[in-house]
Amino acid sequence: MATRTLQAPAKTSGRDRAERKLAFRMTAPSLFIMALVAAVPIGYAIWLSLNQYSVRTAGLSRFVGLENYVNALASQEWWAAFGQTFLFAGLSVSLELILGTAMALLLNLAFKGRAVLRTVVLLPYAIITVVSAITWQTMFQPNMGLVTNVLSALGLPGGDVVWLGEHGYAMAVIVMADVWKTTPFAALIILAGLQVISAETYEAAELDGASKWQTFVNITLPLLRPAIVLAAIFRTMDALRVFDLPFVLTRGANGTESMSMLAYTQLRENRLVGEGSALSILTFLTVMVVSVIYVRFAGGNIRDVAKEEQ
Amino acid sequence: MSTLTAERPTADLAKRPKAPKRRLRGESKLHPLVWVFVVAVMAFSLIPFYWLVNTSLKKGASLSQGELFPSQPTLENYLVVFQNPEFLLALRNSVIIAVVTTTVALVFASFAAYALARLKMRRKAMILTLILSVTTFPAIAIAAPMFSIWREIGLYDTLLGLIIPKLTFALPLAIYTLTSFFKEIPRELEESAYMDGATPFVAFRKVILPLAVPGLATTAILVFISVWNEFLLAVTLTTSPEARPVPVAIAFFSGTSEFDQPLGTISAASVIITVPLVILVLVCQKRIVSGMTAGAVKG
């Protein structure tokens, strides 16, 4: 007996060491790939952004320090793209959260046809973003589109507008295409949050004579906050990287050029490697700053998850 | 996650003794206004699909007048798409890229996720945070330098040159989803394997992996959809039809002149690549929902 109790701790710590070793070996391949294909390119992008590359002679370059950044930050294009990206993110994410909460509340009701509703709501998720863009292009096409034709038939404004060809209108179509495709995602995250609120909580409120609206505002919304914040984080990070929708719908014209699009245009279309790299690093930094702010001020649940891991 | 099944509210209602009989199956009468809202949500989800299909079935005047119902529906647009060699190549490329990336990501991610979910490990929180932060990287920050690196070493405009960077974004998604699946498997099962003298790796292979098949399938679906959907890396790192995947091919379909209306053909191509994904979502609905919300809510 005595020898056994003496052996036991030594054995576990040996197993501990073996376990840590195994854990390292099992995570190493993934971390290696991610480091190689995320960290190395970003490091290289920083180097590229400090140089200027000849458009005519391949391989000819000169070190210019921060000049590309200074030029980008002094340019009207960068701030326009910055503003348009944030406008897009603000509009689309707010609509997605409001609509997503409403959809989640519907999906949480027990009624005939709920399964059908859930399937229907999930369908746009199957659409690739490029196709979502094309779908909404067909909806708003002058003369050919459903929305434009219905608006003209009803004599409402907007029927004779070339939606993708005008400031404001073009942004509206892009926001619509995004809301359509990604609201199901927000709705499902919020629904998952809704379903862990216990029935007893509602029963207590009912006993206290709270109205449905009071119950929603005072009980459901506060308890739903972590789920809504999580959906907001995922959606905002995605929206700030928006690229596919303006690329297909407007090629960035009419006040829809996003930060990613601007960097892409400089890099691929104008062959300005240094400038394009500086713009992509600026995009990267912008998204990182926003994600840090989110996690700091709103992401209590994310920090909890991290703590739980420790 | 398991709370998302349809049975849950039924059970809740059944617990209430006051509920009248007709509500026992969990159905309640909805306020008419709520029905209006249900119909509005369905319309918002479905009408754009209808219009895409409608557009794909029209040609000429029928197309340019925007008929609500095609007066002379035609499959000509579909024929044009299927006779387009570039579209067929793009389909092939997309399938190869998505299948290879998903498979490789799943193999590596299941190792990493097991370590993160179960094993004792130093700096686990930091590693998990690092992995999660990769998912927020804007793809342009990777695509821009990759464009230069790939052109130097000859991977530009190749399928492999697309699979590698896509893997970087597929891995964190797979690790994150799988970690929350692995955590749900009861520990007792591994403990009994340890009692029988199994090492942690054997426990992983013989106990966890077989039990995690549903979670692996779910993760595979999510990763597949996300790789299939990805556009920025694809458009930056390819230039020829031999390497272009479907989203890029479709985006450049529309790149013809302002004056002709290829919208019918583009719509047909869009319908063709959407149908398999819609079927996938219909068949695997529950899996997708559980995967999308995995780890989102504890309990």
Image: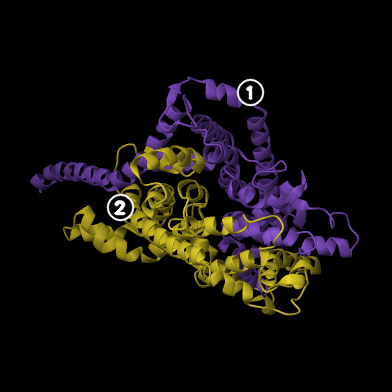
Chain colours: A purple, B yellow
Of residues A278 and A85, the one nearer the viewer is A278
Task: Tell me the element at label 1.
Answer: helix
Mark seen at residue B111: 2
- Tell me whether the residue at label 2 lies in contact with that at label 1, contact meaning CB atoms closer than 8 angstroms: no
Front: mark 2 or 1: 1
Q: Is residue A203 visible to the viewer in this orientation of the structure?
A: no
Other-residue count near label 1 (Cα within 10 Å), few / some / many at <14 / 14–19 / ≥20: few
Of residues A6 and B261, the one nearer the viewer is B261
Residue B234 placed where, x, y %?
48, 51
Residue B201 placed where, x, y %?
22, 54
Residue extending furthest toward the front: A56
Residue A272 placed where, x, y %?
52, 33
Residue B270 placed where, x, y %?
59, 65
What residue did someone put label 1 on? A74
Other-residue count near label 2 (Cα within 10 Å), few / some / many at <14 / 14–19 / ≥20: many
Task: Tell me the element at label 2.
Answer: helix
Task: Give the image quarter of residue A310.
Answer: top left
Query: Label 1 is found on which chain of the structure?
Result: A
* Residue A208 in the figure: left or right of residue A15: right
Residue at position x 39%, y 41% in the image: B151
Residue at position x 32%, y 52% in the image: B108
Query: Label 2 is found on which chain of the structure?
Result: B
- Amino acid bearing label 1: Ala
Q: Is residue A286 above or below residue B169?
A: above
Residue extending furthest toward the right: A155
Task: Give the image quarter of residue A207.
Answer: bottom right
Residue at position x 76%, y 73% in the image: B62
